[in-house]
Amino acid sequence: MRLIAASLALAVVIGYLLGGRLSSVASLRVRWQSLAIVGLALQVIPVPGRALSLGLLYVSFALLLAFALANVRAGVAGSWLILIGIALNFTVIGLNQGMPVTRDALVASGQGETLAVLLDDGGAKHHVAGPSDRLLFLGDVLPIRPIRMVASPGDLIAYAGVVWLVVAAMLGRFAPSRERPGEPAVLPESVHDVG
């Protein structure tokens, strides 16, 4: 959550520096946002048992991938980066049955005390990296000391996409225009008069 908050704060600062307005974000329209909400919720709800937790984590990533892909197809700003970041995280989690976190990154981020928790029972999403983990460079290996977090390359790429999306929304340029000069705007079906 701290990385999300830091990313959003950075996006707002950049948006203002480029002359954007926060009120413009209200016009932001993304596709299948309910998939993103459910996908993110599945990652944080506590459930008993590692198998069920891991299963829900995989479903979560499938939903997030579908959300990102729908928005890539719609041309929404930043959605390519969001898709790539989610895909990288899903790959390393799928290969290792959870996200490997390196000891060095935990200590460097000021979270040395977290090692004991992860070694005891890290849950479905995270575990201390071991010799059998594959593609470890895609795991949680990047310490972010100011906010006491460890991130993966996929996290940073996805959040860069979120920053891009918010900045573009503040500037009123979050998706390519579907209108051609001289043609009337096409309204979504829900706006058309049905009577």
Image: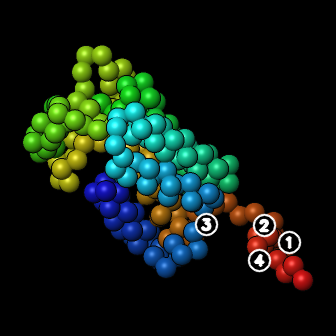
Which quadrant would the C terminus be assigned to in this image?
bottom right
Q: Is residue 189 visible?
A: yes
Question: Which residue does the numbered mark 2 point to in the structure image?
Answer: 179
Whichever of labels 2 and 3 marks the residue nearer the N terminus, that label is: 3
Which quadrant would the N terminus be assigned to in this image?
bottom left
Q: Are marks 1 and 2 in contact (CB under 8 Å)?
A: yes
Farthest residue to the right: give it.
195
**Where residue 84 sits in the image (x, y, percent)?**
51, 39
**Where residue 156 sits in the image (x, y, percent)?**
37, 45
Secondary structure of the residue carrying numbered label 2: loop
Local packing at callout 4 (Cα closer than 10 Å; few below 14, some 14-19, many 20+) is few
Q: Are marks 1 and 3 in contact (CB under 8 Å)?
A: no
The disc at residue 183 is 1
- Between marks 3 and 4, how big is the CA–CA gap? 14 Å
Question: Which residue does the numbered mark 3 point to in the structure image?
Answer: 29
Nearest to the eye among marks 3 and 4: give it: 4
**Where residue 50 sits in the image (x, y, percent)?**
35, 35
Q: Residue at x 43, y 68 (%)?
A: 15
Farthest residue to the bottom: give it.
195
- Between marks 4 and 2, how big is the CA–CA gap? 16 Å
Nearest to the eye among marks 2 and 3: give it: 3
Kind of residue sitting beneath label 4:
Val
Question: Which residue does the numbered mark 4 point to in the structure image?
Answer: 191
Examine the rendered structure and indicate whether residue 177 appears above or below residue 106.
Answer: below
Nearest to the eye among marks 4 and 2: give it: 4
Secondary structure of the residue carrying numbered label 1: loop
